């Protein structure tokens, strides 16, 4: 399917009811993960709540919320870890929630993550339902909930917030709601650097929509559709629609661009100042060279060679899933979004243990699996999802109780 408009969206009053099975299933899968984490952590005499709210990036976000920007840590090797690397929307929400409730900044971050994860699940359902129907929508949500790194969806991290904004921006694009799509893309750009992927999706959709609807002269020189109208297509845009589309495209990149430019001004290093901040964390984009060296280094001994083989298998699986998305003929904005998220995750030179987490927002990769799962008998699909959810819960508990950040 390549057209932006595919299925008729359900009326607003019934949208939540339509999504209810997916949201209930999502809550059940994530509750299983939290129970497993609590039991595993208790056995190790650790606090599951602390693991979710007060370690690693959660601490940096809470510090930004409480003290603002300007804090940095200088390591013995000369690296400088600055909190300017963390985009501001999650800390802003933590500060707001802390101001109006008794919650600490950490508790506010946890609350935002939980609510955002439900919003993300709803957005993923809305996209999949619009394209492939409600059963595929439910399956897509359950698969996203049961990802091996799904426990991150319940942490005071920004992944859930970003995925919610990205999913609903993509849905707005599919529905032709350009100002909403651009506004949500702007907010996604204030949440994570990969907000560029959402802006790119909005721009790809806007450009192709213009070409498709405005490149072929119609009667009396008017510009009309480039092909015969098909079932479910939106009508050719009038002047107001063109202006709304342009507004959406204008808004989409402002979040990322605005924060990056502010960091450059704040540091006095100009437009490239944010890249210097990321370099202090040993983050950058090298086309995957550092990751390839890391994987190759796993093959120096037999036990670590198994890990190296697993990493290669994971990268191949991601590539196969993206190829399946292309063969499935997903709408262009979904392909652009998933492609950019995947490229930025796999080709970054930063902490390699975080790559599965960085791939988590690329939910369109799950749609081919969701469609295949939806075609099975309900009993079989439930068995598959149940098994995957149980494995995810155990792995998430083990992973989060490890020594390094997810």
Image (spheres, rainbow, N blue to C red):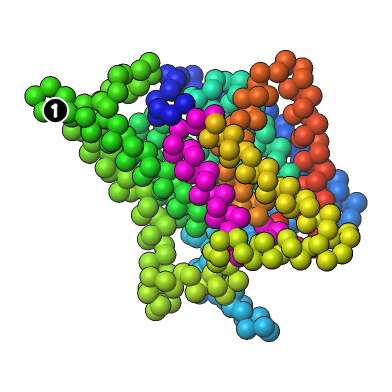
Vertical placement of 37 versus 104: above or below?
above
For the point 50% across and 54% down, the residue is 194
Pointer 1 residue: 222
Using a 10 Å C-alpha cutoff, classify the residue at mark 1 as few (fewer than 14 neighbours), some (14 to 19) or many (20 or more). few
* Residue 152, x across and y down, in percent: 67, 49
Q: Would residue 92 be counted in the magenta stretch? A: no
Vertical placement of 255 versus 374: above or below?
below
* Residue in the foreground of this view, choosing between 396 and 334: 334
For the point 62% across and 35% down, the residue is 366
Specify the segment rendered in magenta: 328-354
Res. 61 in view:
no
Res. 342 in view:
yes
Report whether 296 appears left or right of 367.
Answer: right
* Residue 291, x across and y down, in percent: 66, 62
* Residue 260, x across and y down, in percent: 42, 64
Vertical placement of 202 versus 384: above or below?
below
* Residue in the foreground of this view, choosing between 362 and 255: 362
* Residue 245, x across and y down, in percent: 29, 38
Element class at badge 1:
loop
Majority secondary structure in the magenta region: helix
- Which of the image's four quarters has the C terminus? bottom right
For the point 44% across and 20% down, the residue is 7
Q: Would residue 330 be counted in the magenta stretch? A: yes
């Amino acid at each position: 399917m390549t057209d932006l408009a595919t299925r008729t969206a359900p009326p607003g009053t019934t949208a939540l009811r339509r999504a209810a099975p997916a949201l209930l299933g999502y809550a059940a899968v994530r509750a299983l993960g939290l129970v497993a984490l609590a039991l595993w952590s208790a056995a190790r005499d650790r606090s599951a709540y602390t693991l979710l709210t007060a370690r690693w990036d959660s601490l940096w976000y809470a510090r930004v919320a409480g003290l603002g920007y300007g804090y940095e840590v200088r390591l013995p090797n000369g690296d400088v870890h600055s909190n300017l690397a963390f985009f501001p929307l999650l800390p802003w929400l933590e500060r707001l929630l802390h101001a109006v409730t008794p919650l600490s900044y950490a508790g506010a971050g946890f609350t935002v993550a939980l609510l955002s994860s439900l919003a993300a699940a709803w957005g993923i359902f809305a996209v999949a339902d619009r394209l492939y129907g409600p059963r595929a929508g439910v399956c897509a949500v359950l698969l996203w909930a049961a990802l091996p790194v799904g426990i991150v969806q319940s942490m005071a991290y920004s992944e859930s917030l970003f995925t919610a904004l990205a999913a609903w921006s993509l849905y707005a694009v599919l529905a032709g709601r350009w100002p909403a799509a651009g506004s949500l893309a702007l907010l996604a750009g204030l949440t994570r650097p990969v907000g560029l992927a959402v802006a790119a999706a909005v721009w790809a959709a806007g450009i192709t929509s213009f070409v498709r609807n405005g490149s072929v002269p119609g009667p009396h020189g008017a510009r009309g559709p480039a092909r015969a109208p098909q079932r479910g297509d939106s009508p050719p845009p009038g002047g107001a629609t063109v202006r709304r589309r342009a507004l959406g495209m204008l808004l989409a990149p402002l979040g990322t661009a605005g924060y990056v430019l502010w960091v450059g001004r704040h540091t006095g290093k100009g437009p490239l100042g944010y890249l210097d901040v990321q370099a202090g964390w040993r983050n950058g984009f090298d086309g995957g060279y550092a990751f390839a060296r890391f994987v190759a280094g796993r093959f120096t001994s037999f036990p670590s060679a198994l890990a190296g083989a697993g990493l290669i298998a994971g990268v191949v699986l991601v590539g196969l899933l993206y190829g399946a998305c292309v063969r499935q003929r997903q709408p262009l904005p979904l392909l652009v979004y998933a492609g950019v998220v995947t490229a930025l995750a796999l080709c970054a030179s930063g902490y390699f243990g975080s790559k599965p987490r960085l791939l988590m927002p690329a939910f369109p990769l799950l749609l081919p699996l969701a469609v295949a799962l939806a075609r099975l008998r309900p009993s079989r699909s439930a068995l598959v999802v149940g098994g995957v959810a149980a494995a995810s819960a155990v792995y998430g508990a083990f992973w989060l109780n490890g020594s390094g950040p997810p």
